[in-house]
Structures are given as structure tokens and as C-alpha cells.
């Protein structure tokens, strides 16, 4: 599955909705046992959540958007398929979250590309299930430090802390993903799926149990004037970086 949402593959409400529907279809297709998640947009895997969906919109819009983010996470993190992230470029925040939901991450070996949960840099807070997903991969200490600092890791540093599993030359990301997929698919599905579910279900259940409260929290947090101001300042900084 190749994400395509120019210019930076941000996760808009439309992309998230299409993504979840697409994943659902593959999930029930018995002929599909694995999925490689990547982007058509070298050098960007995904710029994370579309910030414009979180600025200057109504409470109803924020609620619908957040439900779509939750749905993407529930489907991706909870998938029965083998999912491999072919991270062919930078991957901040929501993009990093998507990669972390996969079973294995292969990243283009270039210090130009970075990955991480940088929410605090925008003046916003990664919710508990973003934190849980990162903790699941790299442990509490690294997660705490990374989340407080909103740290983005260049590819070599990301490998060092285990945020990604393997670095390969840029032109080998897709072919390596196919090789790794073959290895994962050599394990009998039922045994692998039960094992995956046993480990991930408690993490998934935490969100399922408080999904509505999590939406309400998001809506009230993102609607605050101070938070809206932080996001606008951040967008302006992105624009100025170009000049
Ligand atoms: N959403 C919307 N627009 C974006 C985003 C984004 N996430 N990222 C970039 N853009 C826009 C830029 O503003 C720019 O717009 P314009 O052309 O109108 O000026 C355009 O895309 C191109 O951006 P760049 O020139 O910066 O492109 P580069 O190729 O130089 O860099 C990067 C690409 C590395 C992706 C860079 O754009 C970047 O770092 N973007 C910011 C990414 C980011 O910080 N994302 C965080 C989103 S928040 C999130 O995912 C989780 C939120 C959890 C919510 C919790 C709340 C309670």
C-alpha cells in the first residue's frame, strides 16, 4: 500500500478514511496475508497528521478527524496481517506512529531522513496510545525522553535506539521489505496471529475502553486558543524555513 497525498503525505481525514477502508478490505481477503506500507513520495514517508485538519475547524470536525485517527491506529496496530513499513523518507509524528504500528521497519539509510514523535515541538501532547505504541517498541526510558523533547531521530540514530529495525540504501528499501516479508510469511499464520494478538490486545483494549473520552479530550485540547496559536506559529515556521 503506497500512501499518496501531495505535497508531503500528511494524514488528512480523507486519507485516513480511505486507508482504514482499504486495510479492512485486505484484512477480510483470505488471499492477502501481508502488507508493505510505504509512500509514493520519496523522500517523505508521511508528514504525520494534517495540521490543517486541526486548525480553525469546528468541534464536530475535530471529533470526526480524531475518530479517523483512532480508527487507523486500531486497524493498523490490531491487524492480523504481517505489516512491514518501508520507510522511504522522513516520518514525523503520525507518520512515525504508523511505522511503529507495523511488525518490522526498514528505513532508507540517510541522515537526511528522520523519524520520531515530535508533538511537543508543536506545543501539543501525544496521547497515551501514541506513547503506548512507542513504549511497546523502544521501552519506557527512551519513550519518556523522546516524547518530552519531541525528538526526531536521523535514520542512523533511529536504528541505534531500535525505533527502526534495519537501514538499507534508498534504492533497496522496497526489495528488502519483500525479502523480509517472505521470511515472516514462512511462519504458520494462526500461530503468528495469536502471538501478535496476545501481545498487542492489552494495549488496544486501553483505547477501546476509553475511546469517547479520548475524543472529548482531543476536542477540548485542540480547541483551546493557546493550542490553536501554537499550531499556527508552527505552520508559519514551516513556511519560513522554505524562504
Ligand atoms: N500537515 C499539513 N501541512 C503540512 C504538514 C502537516 N503535517 N507538514 C508539512 N506541511 C506543508 C507545509 O506547511 C508546506 O506547505 P506550503 O507549501 O503551503 O508552505 C508543504 O507541506 C511542504 O512542506 P515543506 O516545505 O516543509 O516540505 P519539506 O519537503 O521541506 O519537508 C517535512 C517535509 C519533513 C515532512 C516537513 O514538512 C515537516 O517536518 N513537516 C512537519 C511535520 C510535523 O511536525 N507533523 C506533526 C503533525 S502532528 C501529528 O502527527 C500528531 C498529532 C497528535 C495530536 C495530539 C493532540 C492532542
Image: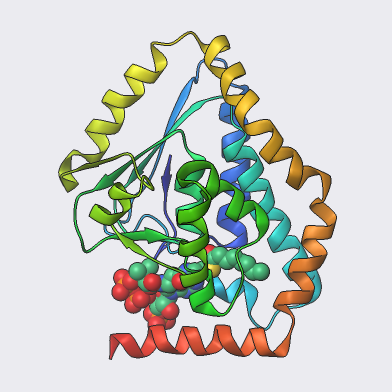
**Number of dots carrying numbers:** 0
* Residue 48 is at least partly visible in this image: no
198 vs 25, nearest the viewer: 198
Q: Quadrant of ligand 1?
A: bottom left
Q: Residue at x 37, y 65 (%)?
A: 152
169 vs 204, nearest the viewer: 204
For this orientation, the residue located farthest to the front is: 141
Indicate the position of residue 151 as horizontal and vertical percent values. Answer: 41, 67
The quarter of the picture where the C terminus appears is: bottom left
Quadrant in the picture for residue 201: top right
* Residue 210 is at least partly visible in this image: yes
Q: Residue at x 46, y 71 (%)?
A: 149
Indicate the position of residue 52 as horizontal and vertical percent values. Answer: 57, 76
The quarter of the picture where the N terminus appears is: top left
Colour setting: rainbow
189 vs 209, nearest the viewer: 209
Quadrant in the picture for residue 194: top right
Indicate the position of residue 7 as horizontal and vertical percent values. Answer: 38, 67
Indicate the position of residue 16 as horizontal and vertical percent values. Answer: 59, 53
Q: Is residue 183 above or below residue 161?
A: above
Q: Residue at x 68, y 47 (%)?
A: 71
Q: Is residue 11 above or below residue 85?
A: below
For this orientation, the residue located farthest to the top is: 188
Q: Residue at x 71, y 90 (%)?
A: 225
> In the figure, is residue 114 to the left or right of 229?
left
> In the figure, is residue 197 to the left or right of 84?
right
Amino acid at each position: 500500500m503506497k500512501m499518496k497525498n501531495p505535497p508531503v503525505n500528511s494524514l488528512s481525514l480523507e486519507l485516513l478514511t480511505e486507508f482504514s477502508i482499504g486495510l479492512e478490505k485486505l484484512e477480510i481477503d483470505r488471499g492477502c496475508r501481508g502488507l508493505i506500507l510505504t509512500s509514493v513520495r520519496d523522500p517523505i514517508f508521511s508528514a504525520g497528521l494534517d495540521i490543517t485538519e486541526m486548525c480553525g475547524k469546528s468541534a464536530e470536525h475535530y471529533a470526526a478527524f480524531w475518530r479517523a485517527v483512532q480508527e487507523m491506529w486500531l486497524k493498523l496496530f490490531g491487524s492480523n496481517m504481517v505489516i512491514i513499513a518501508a520507510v522511504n523518507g522522513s516520518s514525523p509524528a503520525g507518520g512515525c506512529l504508523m511505522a511503529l504500528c507495523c511488525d518490522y521497519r526498514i528505513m532508507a539509510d540517510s541522515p537526511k531522513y528522520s523519524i520520531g514523535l515530535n508533538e511537543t515541538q508543536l506545543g501539543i501532547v501525544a496521547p497515551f496510545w501514541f506513547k503506548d505504541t512507542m513504549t511497546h517498541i523502544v521501552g519506557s526510558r527512551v519513550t519518556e525522553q523522546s516524547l518530552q523533547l519531541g525528538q526526531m531521530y536521523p535514520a542512523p540514530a533511529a536504528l541505534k535506539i531500535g525505533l527502526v529495525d534495519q537501514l538499507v540504501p534508498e534504492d533497496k528499501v522496497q526489495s528488502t521489505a519483500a525479502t523480509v516479508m517472505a521470511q515472516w510469511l514462512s511462519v504458520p499464520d494462526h500461530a503468528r496471529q495469536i502471538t501478535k494478538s496476545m501481545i498487542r490486545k492489552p494495549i488496544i483494549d486501553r483505547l477501546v475502553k476509553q475511546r469517547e473520552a479520548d475524543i472529548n479530550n482531543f476536542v477540548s485540547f485542540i480547541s483551546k486558543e493557546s493550542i490553536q496559536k501554537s499550531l499556527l506559529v508552527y505552520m508559519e515556521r514551516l513556511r519560513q524555513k522554505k524562504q
